[in-house]
């Protein structure tokens, strides 16, 4: 079966990592698929670098792109279209091809646009619902997303939950920090510096831990960066927090940290906590969305109620002051990652579902 994989996102993030995992596994199996990506996007560049130039068609929302994509998919005798995101679903719908369609839903259409006004949020929810109801099958990356979709009228029997998975990375030869930093408790945050990611609550929590010897690195860019820097100064921890900017190589250094904090107001099923589990880093996450399914409090990580900075501070303090408990949690989390959340497990479940359609 030949599949057209569609991702028209402008940036490179979790969805694109997911796509590359599926594409690599399909290629390993000898499958020859077609990929549609937005012109001049970071994803298109990554596809070219990864050797998918011949399989990839750069498209946009113009009549020429739609006609060329329709011609290419007919010529290639594509039997199924797999979309990722609302833009991808819109483009696939415009193609008007009579083939099977599967959509993977990676987030909440409203929460993903929390910075927008309510009318824009509702508009995207309405559009996503229209697109998903036309699909033969919907893949939700967590039970939380499935429940949201059911609440919006998508039939339960059409939705299959397949959790995200990532490629396992070996950290056995990695080196730790040197000098002064070696004696510091090291915390990191990885994500967009936007309201939905909740970085402000981490900063407020850290302000309650001034008595502790720690260093927090914040990886990411976004519209709130300067506001968050100002907040660090206001609460007196600017010397303990470093804004590192965006890094595409975060996995290579993740094992240097003691804790990853994921203080989001909502998460469908994030990849960074999986990367932390793989790296032997304890995850402290807000009790929302797919994080509820990933973290068993006190067993595979620690949870706190979203937006509660004081509770988050107490969780961080608990890790600092209880090394034996933290070590046991990290071990449990690594075992869970290996058993349930590797790239191979995700791909096997996904391809089995696609073939069944």
Image (tube, rainbow, N blue to C red):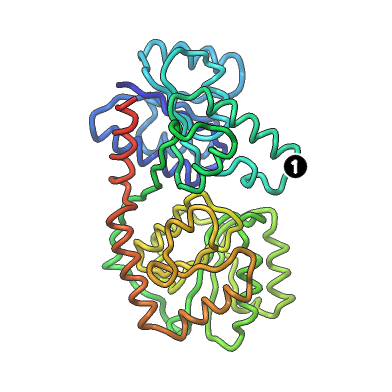
Q: Position of residue 120 (x, y in %)?
A: 72, 37
Q: So how many labels did they put on this image?
A: 1
Along the line of sight, the residue nearer the viewer: 262 or 127: 127
Residue 118: name its quadrant. top right
Q: Around disc 1, counting alpha carbons within 10 Å, would you say few (fewer than 14), some (14 to 19), or many (20 or more)?
A: few
Residue drawn at (69%, 33%) of the image: 123
Along the line of sight, the residue nearer the viewer: 316 or 43: 316
Q: Is residue 124 left or right of residue 327?
A: right
Q: Position of residue 44 (x, y in %)?
A: 48, 34
26 over 305 or under it: above or below: above
Residue 73: name its quadrant. top left
268 over 188 or under it: above or below: above
235 over 18 or under it: above or below: below
Along the line of sight, the residue nearer the viewer: 344 or 239: 344
Which quarter of the rendering shows the C terminus?
top left
- Residue ranking furthest to the left: 29
Which quarter of the rendering shows the N terminus?
top left
Q: Position of residue 66 (x, y in %)?
A: 55, 16
Residue drawn at (61%, 19%) of the image: 62
- Residue ranking furthest to the bottom: 211
Residue 64: name its quadrant. top right
Residue drawn at (54%, 63%) of the image: 286
Q: Position of residue 249 (x, y in %)?
A: 44, 56
As helix, strand or loop, the secondary structure at mark 1 comes to helix
- Which residue, given by chain and number where applicable, does mark 1 sit on? 118
Q: Is residue 88 left or right of residue 19?
A: right
Residue drawn at (33%, 75%) of the image: 328
């Amino acid at each position: 079966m030949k599949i057209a994989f569609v991702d028209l996102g402008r940036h490179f993030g979790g969805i694109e990592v997911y796509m590359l995992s599926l594409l690599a596994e399909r290629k390993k199996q000898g499958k020859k698929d077609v990929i549609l990506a937005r012109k001049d996007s970071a994803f298109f560049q990554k596809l070219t670098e990864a050797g998918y130039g011949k399989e990839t068609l750069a498209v946009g929302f113009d009549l020429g792109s739609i006609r060329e994509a329709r011609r290419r998919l007919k010529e290639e005798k594509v039997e199924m279209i797999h979309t990722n995101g609302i833009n991808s679903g819109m483009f696939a719908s415009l193609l008007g091809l009579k083939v099977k369609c599967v959509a993977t839903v990676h987030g909440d259409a409203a929460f993903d646009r929390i910075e927008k006004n309510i009318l824009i949020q509702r508009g995207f929810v309405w559009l996503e619902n229209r697109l998903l109801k036309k699909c033969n099958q919907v893949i939700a990356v967590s039970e939380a997303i499935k429940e949201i979709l059911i609440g919006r009228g998508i039939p339960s029997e059409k939705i299959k939950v397949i959790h995200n998975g990532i490629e396992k990375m070996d950290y056995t030869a990695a080196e730790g920090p040197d000098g002064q930093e070696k004696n510091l408790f090291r915390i990191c945050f990885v994500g967009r510096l936007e309201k939905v990611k909740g970085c402000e609550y981490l900063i407020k929590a850290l302000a309650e831990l001034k008595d502790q010897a720690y260093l927090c690195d914040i990886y990411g860019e976004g519209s709130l960066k300067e506001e968050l820097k100002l907040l660090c100064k206001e609460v007196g921890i600017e010397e303990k927090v470093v804004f590192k900017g965006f890094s595409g190589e975060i996995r290579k250094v993740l094992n240097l940290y003691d804790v990853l904090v994921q203080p989001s107001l909502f998460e469908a099923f994030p990849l960074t906590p999986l990367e932390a589990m793989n790296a032997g880093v304890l995850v402290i996450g807000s009790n929302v969305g797919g994080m509820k399914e990933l973290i068993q409090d006190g067993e595979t990580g620690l949870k706190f109620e979203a937006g509660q900075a004081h509770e988050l501070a107490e969780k961080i303090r608990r890790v600092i002051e209880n090394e034996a408990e933290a070590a046991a949690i990290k071990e449990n989390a690594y075992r869970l990652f290996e058993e349930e959340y590797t790239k191979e497990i995700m791909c096997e479940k996904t391809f089995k579902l696609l073939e069944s359609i």
